[in-house]
Image (tube, rainbow, N blue to C red):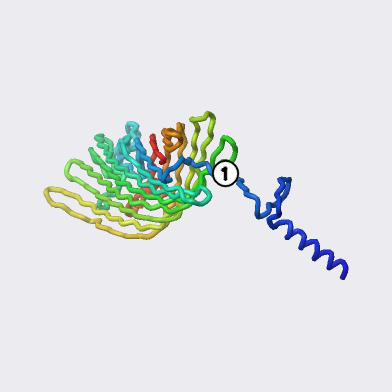
Amino acid sequence: MRAFAIAVLSISTVFAQNQCPQKCTPSQKLYFSNCEKVSVTPPAGPAVSCGVNLGISGDFLYWTVRQDGLFHAVSGVDASIPAGSSVAKGRVHDLNWEMDPGFRVSLSYDLPHDGWELLGRYTWMRTDVANTTRDPNLVSYWSINGNDPLKAIHSSSAKWKLHFDGAQLELGRNCYLSQYLKLRPHVGLNAAWIDQSYEVLQMDSSTTDSMKLTQDFWGVGLQAGLNTSWQFLYQFSLFGDLDLSILWGQFDLNRKDTTTAAGVTTSRVNVAVNPHTFEPVLGLAAGLRWEDWVSDNRYHYLFQAGWEHQLWILQNELIKVNGEVGHTGDLVLQGLTVRASLDF
């Protein structure tokens, strides 16, 4: 009984010590009393004086947008070549990928709680690429209208268009991990609308085959990530960003093939499907940043330039018919991103 009383007295003493005493003295400890203000990862702002806690930014994008599985013809194939002969070496013909301009705008608000920040972002990107090839030893990479894949053609052209619109809503906190290293973990929502069309036109001596595929995707889902800033001078830093999203969405897929011979057009393939699915997205960015304050710290401005990647895993869901392989893959948006921002 005496031992039990001593144990109760000891526990009561510990709880009493954890309440706010008259005077708090710093010392090595495993916990802090209620009267002590603890800042393990102090907010890193950027904070301004006498401001409204808003931030705006604009990005200029100079990206290339590419998708796997859009080959349209193969040269160096001749099913009628005599035995003992060898056809000239050919290649698989893809689209002529290009760099295209785009933009991104963001608006942020610093919440009055522990340095949290609410940020909204919109991204706009468009691309339109094509390719035409002519070769005496050419076959299609598609079974257009159910044709034999080894059917000889003498010309093939393909064009692909993509419209990308993305929106994110993030809750983040920029904080110091050390004197020169800042981290900004964030969570939120990611939404996207990606519309694309792919057309192929192929001709031989007597017929013209055409194929038109469309793929419209919308999706929304959770996003989480980490932004880092590695300060090596007062105004200069290196940044590196990583984020991962999983979107739940729907594809609207259509395909129509036709063959025209002697003025008569025949369509043997006319298909549509609207599946729901998950879409994983990985984002990476890195570059150089410069920032400073002006007007007695009333305004903070920032300029940065870097390289950015977005990987949309297995985004290519274009309709394939029996025998068509090699037409699946990922959508990649990557290139130069230049940003200017103002906090006030």
Query: Most extreme residue toward the bottom, as rendered?
Result: 1
Residue 305 in percent (x, y) is at 42, 33
Q: Secondary structure at mark 1?
A: loop
Residue 104 in percent (x, y) is at 35, 42
Q: Is residue 184 left or right of residue 90?
A: right
Image quarter (top left, top right, bottom left or bottom right) of the N terminus: bottom right
134 is higher (above) or lower (below) than 225: above
14 is higher (above) or lower (below) than 138: below
Which residue occupies 31% across, 38% down?
A: 95
Image quarter (top left, top right, bottom left or bottom right) of the C terminus: top left
Kind of residue indicated by mark 1: Pro
Residue 116 in percent (x, y) is at 49, 49
Q: Which residue is mark 1?
A: 42
Query: Most extreme residue toward the top, as rendered?
Result: 233
Q: Is residue 222 left or right of residue 143?
A: right
Q: Nearer the viewer, residue 49 or 100?
A: 49
Within the image, what quadrant is residue 87 found in?
A: top left
Residue 130 visible within the image? yes
Residue 82 visible within the image? no
Which residue occupies 72% across, 47% down?
A: 25
Q: Residues within 10 Å of mark 1 (few under 14, many from 20)?
A: some
Residue 67 in percent (x, y) is at 36, 43
Which residue occupies 71% across, 54% down?
A: 21
